[in-house]
Structures are given as C-alpha cells and as structure tokens.
Amino acid sequence: MRYFSIESSQMRRMAQFLLALVLGLALLTWAASSVVRTTAQEWFERDVNSRARLALAGARPSLAAAWNGDPGALRAQIVALNRDERVMGVALCNADFTVRASTPGFPEAFGCWAVGSRVRGEDGWSSVATLPTGRASVNAVPVEELGFAVLVQDLSYIERRESQAQTILLVTFALLAALALGVPMFVARWVRSGRRAELRKVRMEMEEQPEDSSLQWNAERLKRTLNRHLHGEKIVILSNREPYLHVRKADGSIEVQHPASGLVTALEPVMRACSGTWVAHGAGSADRETVDRFDRVRVPPGEESYDIRRVWLTEEQEQGYYYGFSNEGLWPLCHVAHARPQFRAEDWRQYREVNQKFADAVCDEADSDDPVILVQDYHFALAPAMIRKRLPAATVIVFWHIPWPNAERLGICPWRDELLEGLLGSSILGFHTQLHCNNFFEAVDRYLETRIDREHHAVVRQGHRTLVRPYPISIEWPVRWAETGETAAESRARVFADLGLKPNALLGVGVDRLDYTKGIEERLEAVETLLERYPEFRGRFTFVQLAAPSRTKIERYRLLNESVEKLTERINARFGQDGYSPIVLLRAHHEPPDVFRYFRAADLCYVSSLHDGMNLVAKEFVAARGDLKGVLVLSEFTGAARELTEALIVNPYDMEAASEAMMVALTMPAEEQRDRMRSMRAVITQFNVYRWAGKMLEDAARLRSQERVASRLSARSLVG
Ligand code: F6P
C-alpha cells in the first residue's frame, strides 16, 4: 500500500509498526535465550559430573592403597582431589557409612549416611541438588570393598555465567532495538524538518514580496508582458467550452452561466487581462439570441473587456466531434480510468470537419498575418496545422488540459499520426507535467518522421519547429469568488442551515462534473469506510457532493450517474438515522459563489480523481480558505498533487488510506491546518494563472523574435 503523505500519521504508523516488531523480537529473544540457558545448563552439568567421576575413578587405586595405612597419606589424597576451586569438598566413607576422612566444609547434606545407601555397583551414584549456596553436583564411587568416596562440586558459577550471558544478550538486543526504532524515526524527523525548513524558506521569500511586487504575477504584469513583448497583439483563444453561456430559464428570462470547467476557470481571468477574442462553441439555449450579426457577444457582463465569437454546430457535428471523437475517444484514451475508448470513422470525419470550421473562425478573427493564437485542449488537435496552413507566420500556442498517454496507449487510436501532425502545427505545445511532454516526444519518435531536439525540448518536422514544454496551469490570485464579503463563519452557518446540520457537525465537500475520471464513486466508498472504521463520526460527519451533470448523452456518464445515486442511497440507508444522512448529493450546476460558500463551510475537501491533468478544484478550495482552516485531501493522480504537497495525498483506490486521511483531516489541530493551508496558499499565490499564461507568452515572444531574426538573415543571404 502506498501510504498517503500525512507526516504525523505516517510517523505514528511507522512507530507503531517498529514498536510491534521490537516487542515481537524481544519476546522471541527472551524465549530463545531461556531455551538456550536450560540446554547449556544441562550440558555444563553433564560435563562437570563426568569430569568428577573421571577424577574419582582415577584416584580410586591410590585411595584403596592408602585406606588402611597412614591417615596422613589418605588426607593428602583427598586434599589433592579437593584442589580445584570449584570442588566444595571430598569425603571418604567406610562401608558402614562412618566418616573415614573429609575436607573441612564438606556439605553436611551429602554426608556418608545421606549418600551411602545410594551408592550401588561400580558406577556409584551422581546427582544435582540445590543447596543454600546454589546448585551443587554430588558424585560418589565405591572404593573396592572398603567404602566409597564422595566429591561435591559447586555449580552456582554456571548459573552466574549464564545470567551474565543472558544480560549481555538482552542489553545487545535493547541497543539494537533502540537503533532500529531510533534511526528511522530520526531520519524521518530530519527529512521532515528539512522539508519544513525549505517550505518555510519559500514561504518567507514569498511573504517578503509585496502583493504588487514586480516579481509577483498578476493581471497587470500579464498585460505589461503582452504589451512589452508582443506589442499588445490581440490574443485569440480557441476552446470548445465558452466562458459564459446564455441560458433561457423556465420563466422566460435569460441567465448568464459560468460553466463547470477547469479550462474556463483558468483562461477567463487571462482573457480579461489581455482582452481579444475567445472563439468557442455556442452551446447555451439563448446564445443565438444574445450575439451580434458577427456572432459576437461582449463579456464579462458589466465589464465588457473581450469578445466571445460563437461558432454554431449542427446536432450531427456536436454528436460526432464533441460526444463521439472528443469524449468517447480521446477522453478515455488520455485518462487512465478504465473506460474503453470508442473510435468511429464517422466521429473522426466530424472531428476533422469541426476542427476546420473552428480553425477558419479563428483565422477570420485574427487581425494580422502573425497573430498570437491560444488553442485549448483535446477538442482541437487538428486545428493548429489547419491554422498554420492559412496563417504560416501565426504563433500558435496549444495547451493540452488533460494527461497525454504513453506511446503504446496512443497507438490504439487509428488516427494517432494525424493527431500528432495536427498538434505539430503549433509553435508551442504545453502540457501540465514533464511526464506528459516525455510521452509526447516518445509518441512522435515512434510514429512520425521527425527530428527531436532534446536539448531545446522541441520537435522539428518538415522544417517547422514546435517547442514542447510543461506549463502547470493554475487559478487567478486572488480569486474574485473568494472576495464576497461573507466570512467563513457566515458561509458555514448558511451552508449548515441549508443542509440542516447540527452546530457540532463535521462537513466534507466534493465539487466535480459528474465524470468517471473524478473518482466520485471511490470517494463515496471512502466515506463509507470512514464510518465503518471510525464509528465516532456516525451521526456527525456529512459529505456533500456538488455534482454538475456532464456529457449526459454518453452511456458511460449515464451509468455513472445511476451508480453514484445508488451508492448514495445505500450508504445513507446503512448509516443514516433520525434525519441524519452521511451523504448529500446535489446533482446540479452550481455557480461559483455557491461553490466557494461550500468550500469555506467545509472541514475538508476531498479531490479523488483517478487521473487528472491538474485539477483546479483543489486549488480553488485552498484559495477559498483565507481563514487558513480546512484540510485538502488530494489524489496522488492529479497534477495538483505535485504542487500542493501540504495536502493529505492519497491513492483514491485505497479505501483504508483515504478514509484514514479523512479521519486525520477531521481531527487535525487548528495550528497544523493553518501551517498546511498557509504553505499551499503561498505556492498558488506565486504560481497563479497569470504566471502560467505569462510564461507561455514570454516563450512565444522569444520564439517570434528568433524567427524574425532568422527570416531577416535568410532574406539577406538570398539577396547576397
Ligand atoms: O479540463 C478538461 C475539460 O474537458 C475541459 O476541456 C472542459 O472545458 C472541461 O473539462 C469540462 O468539460 P466539458 O467542456 O465537456 O463540459
């Protein structure tokens, strides 16, 4: 199991594991040492006994010879037998059990009367007994018909030695255990403190910069960049989704909607800063009624800083290009979310046709021969080459908002070569991560005749160069939806009242389009596991899922919709009680102010994508928490997890880890929440969407000036 990076909990788990290991080993060592001790004792005693009997047997003839002779000679014999320091005493007993001679201090317990009746036959008798001084061995052998000799030896030294050996063993073990426990904990603490120090440093550096410092990217700086480097060129953006939809309501009035789209979240502030034209599919029910005769509408309402140029699609075109090739083909192809891509020739035909239609609209909107055009996402893989054909000097910047698959996976698409060729019409091709850039290089290398210039991160095909770079996308900072004037406490009170929650309730939030890549089912199951494993949250923890219906004409999305509904019902039936429902599923489009209210009200936000290029919901949650409260639980399979390292990072497939992360989030001390939130906010402050766009525009400007110099040089050499 890959463990989520909750440092304190990770350390706790590691410590528990090591402690259990050490206790287990201690028990084992103790048992083993007892067995060894008993066995060694038996061996030692057997040795001592056999040595004693050998000594007695050897002395037997001389004892017999001296038995009835000079008492001095007999005494000398027993003194000789008694010479070893471990011999406690020697006695010679007559056949009638009376003492013939003995050494001083011979233990009374082994007197001639006590031993005599046991000495039988040639072998005599031997035994081990416990005396007040410790264990002792006694050996008695007959001396012809005259009597018998008794030799008593001290065995207490064996016990002493063994207990010393056992002490040494246990001390060694204790030292090793201390090392085994201490070293990993020390290393973990050291790494953690190093990382904290690094983050503190970054944070301090960031905090030292004033809000409007020239180093800080903001709308103003982006505008300046455009003016300085691109001489205020008009920007043309192309995306399928438009930033504002005009929708006719049931009461007949027209409402302006902000679609649930990461792309729009990121690009709209950029467009407000740069002005220009945004070319997109007119998908709102009242879109046609709100455009001028050139199909343009000025937005944002009340601010009117740029144009949307709406392109109309027939139902057939929308079916083949948007639902078919884009969302049943490319979407599952690019996401590792276990949905089989569908590739239909008719969808591909529509995709090509619609790409041409949008490419033409973009060229119509350009007001020079070398415009700056930003093409967005997988709906338009062919448009860059189509635009280049009409406007060869255009600077076409493509950003692919979703992951790019590895070459094998891409290989299953029957039109993979055409997709790659279309994208190589761009000047700059951006992905969220270096990994996706590498995947692209690999695919180009495998399927096309090109030159890959690894040093400059570029692909050269038929004399045209495309830079392929990572540009991790972000959100505007500060986010206008976070500046509502409503405090976090007010938002919480409002949301709690709307959901009918008790004041001491705990709230989790998820915000997504109803898409199978977002891991919504896995998220609900993780909530179920949380309630299973930690009953203290039953009746107290509610998870509210804001789910915007999406791509509902596609079967896979309809199935997801049903499955999420069933899952919600099942979990609520299992853990719901007296008006309490652990899951609240709000299946509807929510406008940004409402979404931000939920963000501010929640104790945790769980982003559980199974695979996601970036995921801007994670960044929006952090942006919403100016109060530095709340915890972000974030899937490791999002691009955002690389930047928001202070989130609780989890594998969304691992229910135990995810539920444990939620438990940690719900019990996290306020100070730790503040620390983590502050770090993440510092990262987004710096790496905001103005920087994202600014970096691409700076690269584009550099490219344009290089191309100008190159074309001047080649013109001169032609003249020369
Ligand atoms: O970011 C990925 C993305 O597919 C965008 O391209 C799109 O705008 C957004 O998600 C929402 O999807 P859709 O436009 O199909 O509703």
Image (cartoon, grey):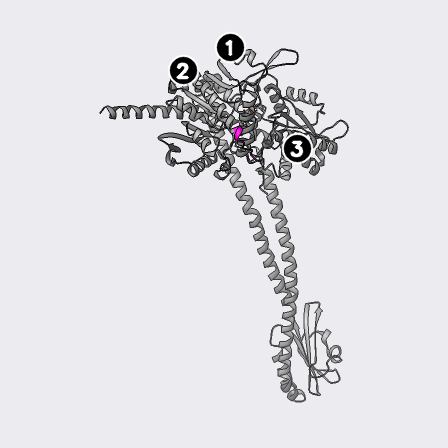
Amino acid type shown at disc 1:
Asp
Three-letter residue code for mark 3: Leu
Q: Nearer the viewer, residue 2 or 112?
A: 2
Residue 135 seen in this snapshot: yes
Is the Cβ of the residue at disc 2 closer than 8 Å to that at disc 3? Answer: no
For discs 2 and 3, the disc positioned in front in the rendered view: 2
Task: Confirm or deny contact between disc 1 and disc 3 (CB under 8 A).
Answer: no
Q: Position of residue 599 (x, y in %)?
A: 61, 24
User: Residue 627 magenta-drawn?
Assistant: no
Q: Which residue is mark 1?
A: 292
Q: Where residue 245 appears, x then y in whole percent?
A: 56, 17
**Which is nearer the N-term, disc 1 or disc 2?**
1
Q: Position of residue 492 (x, y in %)?
A: 65, 22
Q: What is the distance, in whole Å, between disc 2 and disc 3 at their CAs?
A: 50 Å
Mark nearer the N terminus (1 vs 3):
1
- Magenta segment: 339-347
Residue 246 lies in what quarter of the image?
A: top right
Numbered disc 2: secondary structure: loop
Q: As rendered, which of 144 and 318 lies closer to the eye?
A: 318
Q: What residue does disc 2 label?
A: 367
Decide whether residue 344 is among the magenta residues.
yes
The type of residue carrying mark 2 is Asp
Going from the N terminus, do you reach mark 2 or mark 3 first? 2
- Considering every residue shown, the one lying at the far front of the view is 346
Marks 1/3: CA–CA distance: 46 Å
Q: Callout 3: 10 Å neighbours few (<14), some, many (20+)?
A: many
SS at mark 1? loop
Mark 1 surroundings within 10 Å by alpha-carbon count, few (fewer than 14), some (14 through 19), many (20 or more): few
Answer above or below: position of 230 versus 633. Answer: above
Task: Indicate whether 8 appears above or below 629.
Answer: below
- Would you name the residue on which mark 3 appears? 524
Front one among 45 and 189: 189
